[in-house]
């Protein structure tokens, strides 16, 4: 595995060292920048570096303890989908490589205000439109566990960068699975919240009702620390009104409180075997994980979602919405308003392996003009009720299944179209198209039986929660993580 030999891997560890006078924010940031300089030429995980990172760190070091925020001194990476003032933000597209926002996205402002140091922007496919890293701007990114493989997408560089130790944590974006899939492939914890829990202001759209940013980190605790900072209402994003409908606990740290005592005792999990697939390595890890969960006090109940493939097909909104949602985002920025996604595609300015873009540029100019849209929304409501009924009938805390039915793919197999976005066997679309929150937690390592001489690869377990119940979801994730660490 390609990984940094020096540097901190958790927020708590880094902050303890700072408080104890064993290091400084500047020293931590400089080490991360050295790691980037050494490893990123091999990984290709970053699109831009914050040239003021050391200066930002020095400013933080001058603060007294009363002025330090909850993410004080923590170096983070941010997906290129999210705007940062003064740093090139291209959304994975070479057509936007000169675009430099004047204003931070809301969540970037919150990160900085909490004391985090943004190190730079991370790679992604054009407009977040793939399960893989293929980008007209950055080409492909490597998986630190095996450099011949892809880290997953669309938060490709965020996953690869954190796994390799280029930063302690990262922010990704998730429409159909773009936080959870690279987290699974890179051995990280990745969390998708209910859309609207976190502001999307300053984040490019793919399917606006499904889009959400979120954390990618080594541990559930670090993900919880980040959620405590970035979740909340924002007048710039009306969807964040859900935080008024279902407010979190009154504590300033509701997510950290939720995971304080991780346990699976008395938990009930629905096991969705119809989503397990047939990969030998993945199945072996799942068998071991299920036994571990039972041994740790959980009750497992086999469940089935009727007509799952039907609902996955008929609640997919990419062809209906992505073209107009991306174009609306571009039109709202004077520097980018002359661009349209269908014209970028027609002129060869999107990566050739992006079959999802090939499909959705043929979609309507406005989703409101699509005669299928009403049916899709109706099917989505049915899908939500069916799955919620499974929770109610079996009194479940969560439904579990592999984040992906496959291990991280070979980059060559992506470029020669053996694997395509539209046909890929990721399970992440289940939560996304339900608009439910979900987390991917690493539960083991597996061999690719087609390539037995290759290194072992991470396997993630997806934990599906109920809408606006992220605290419960994180508590379950912490319990699963603790149980698997005792394996």
Image (spheres, rainbow, N blue to C red):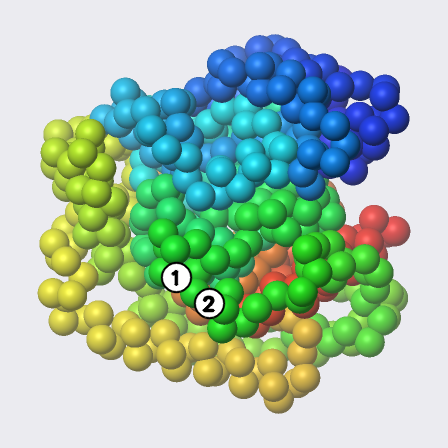
Residue pointed to by mark 1 = 239
- Neighbor class of circle 1 (other Cα within 10 Å; few <14, some 14-19, many 20+) is some
Tell which of 178 and 328 is nearer to you: 328
Residue 207 numbered tag: none
In three-dimensional space, the C-alpha distance between marks 2 and 1, rounded to whole angstroms, equals 6 Å
For the residues bearing labels 2 and 1, Cβ distance under 8 angstroms? yes
Q: Residue lying furthest bottom in this view?
A: 393
User: At 24% from the left edge and 51% from the top edge, which residue is drawn?
Assistant: 325
Q: Can you say whether 92 is above or below 202 in the image?
A: above
Q: Quadrant of residue 466?
A: bottom right
Residue pointed to by mark 2 = 242
Q: Quadrant of residue 160?
A: top right
Q: Can you say whether 71 is above or below 297 in the image?
A: above
Counting labels gives 2
Tell which of 204 and 70 is nearer to you: 70
User: At 50% from the left edge and 24% from the top edge, which residue is drawn?
Assistant: 120
Tell which of 186 and 475 is nearer to you: 475
Q: Secondary structure at mark 2?
A: helix
Quick check: 114 left or right of 322?
A: right
Q: Provide residue 29's location: percent of width, then percent of height.
A: 65, 19
User: At 45% from the left edge and 77% from the top edge, which residue is drawn?
Assistant: 384
Q: Provide residue 17's location: percent of width, then percent of height.
A: 83, 26
Q: Provide residue 222's location: percent of width, then percent of height.
A: 70, 44
Q: Is residue 329 at all visible to an observer of this figure? A: yes
Quick check: 154 left or right of 333?
A: right
The N terminus lies in which quarter of the figure? top right
Q: Secondary structure at mark 1?
A: helix
Quick check: 203 left or right of 213?
A: left
Q: Provide residue 417's location: percent of width, then percent of height.
A: 35, 38
User: At 75% from the left edge and 19% from the top edge, which residue is drawn?
Assistant: 24
- Neighbor class of circle 2 (other Cα within 10 Å; few <14, some 14-19, many 20+) is some
């Amino acid at each position: 595995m390609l990984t940094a030999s020096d540097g901190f891997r958790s927020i708590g560890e880094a902050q303890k060292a700072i408080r104890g006078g064993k290091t400084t924010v500047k020293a931590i940031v400089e080490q991360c920048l050295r790691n980037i300089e050494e490893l990123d030429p091999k990984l290709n995980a970053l699109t831009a570096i914050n040239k003021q990172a050391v200066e930002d760190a020095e400013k933080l070091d001058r603060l007294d303890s009363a002025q330090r925020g909850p993410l004080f001194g923590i170096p983070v990476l941010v997906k290129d989908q999210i705007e940062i003032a003064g740093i090139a933000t291209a959304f994975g597209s070479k057509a936007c490589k000169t675009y430099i926002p004047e204003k931070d996205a809301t969540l970037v402002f919150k990160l900085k205000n909490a004391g985090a140091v943004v190190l730079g922007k991370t790679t992604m496919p054009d407009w977040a439109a793939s399960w893989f890293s293929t980008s007209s701007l950055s080409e492909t990114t490597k998986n630190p566990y095996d450099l011949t493989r892809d880290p997953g997408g669309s938060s490709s560089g965020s996953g690869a960068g954190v796994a390799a130790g280029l930063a302690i944590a990262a922010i990704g974006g998730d429409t159909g699975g773009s936080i959870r899939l690279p987290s699974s492939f890179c051995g990280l914890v990745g969390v998708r919240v209910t859309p609207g829990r976190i502001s999307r202001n300053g984040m490019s759209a793919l399917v606006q009702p499904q889009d959400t940013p979120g954390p990618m980190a080594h541990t559930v605790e670090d993900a919880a620390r980040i959620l405590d900072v970035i979740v909340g209402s924002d007048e710039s994003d009306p969807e964040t009104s859900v935080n008024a409908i279902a407010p979190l606990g009154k504590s300033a740290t509701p997510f950290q409180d939720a995971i304080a005592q991780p346990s699976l005792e008395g938990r009930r999990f629905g096991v969705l075997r119809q989503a397990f697939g047939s990969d030998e390595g993945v199945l072996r890890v799942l068998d071991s994980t299920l036994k571990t969960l039972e041994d740790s006090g959980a009750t497992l109940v086999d469940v089935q979602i009727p007509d799952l493939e039907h609902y996955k097909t008929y609640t997919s909104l990419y062809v209906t919405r992505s073209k107009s949602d991306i174009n609306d985002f571009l039109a709202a920025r004077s520097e980018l308003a002359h661009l349209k996604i269908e014209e970028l595609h027609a002129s060869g300015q999107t990566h050739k392996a992006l079959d999802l873009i090939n499909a959705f540029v043929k979609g309507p100019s406005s989703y409101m003009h699509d005669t299928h849209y009403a049916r899709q929304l109706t099917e989505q409501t049915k899908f939500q009720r069916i799955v919620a009924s499974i929770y109610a009938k079996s009194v479940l805390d969560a439904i579990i299944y592999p984040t992906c039915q496959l291990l991280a793919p070979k980059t060559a197999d992506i470029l020669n179209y053996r694997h395509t976005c539209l046909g890929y066997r990721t399970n992440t679309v289940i939560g996304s198209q339900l608009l439910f929150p979900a987390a991917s937690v690493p539960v083991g390592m597996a061999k690719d039986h087609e390539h037995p001489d290759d290194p072992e690869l991470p396997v993630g377990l997806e934990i599906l929660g109920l809408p606006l119940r992220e605290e419960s979801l994180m508590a379950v994730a912490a319990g699963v993580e603790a149980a698997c660490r005792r394996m």
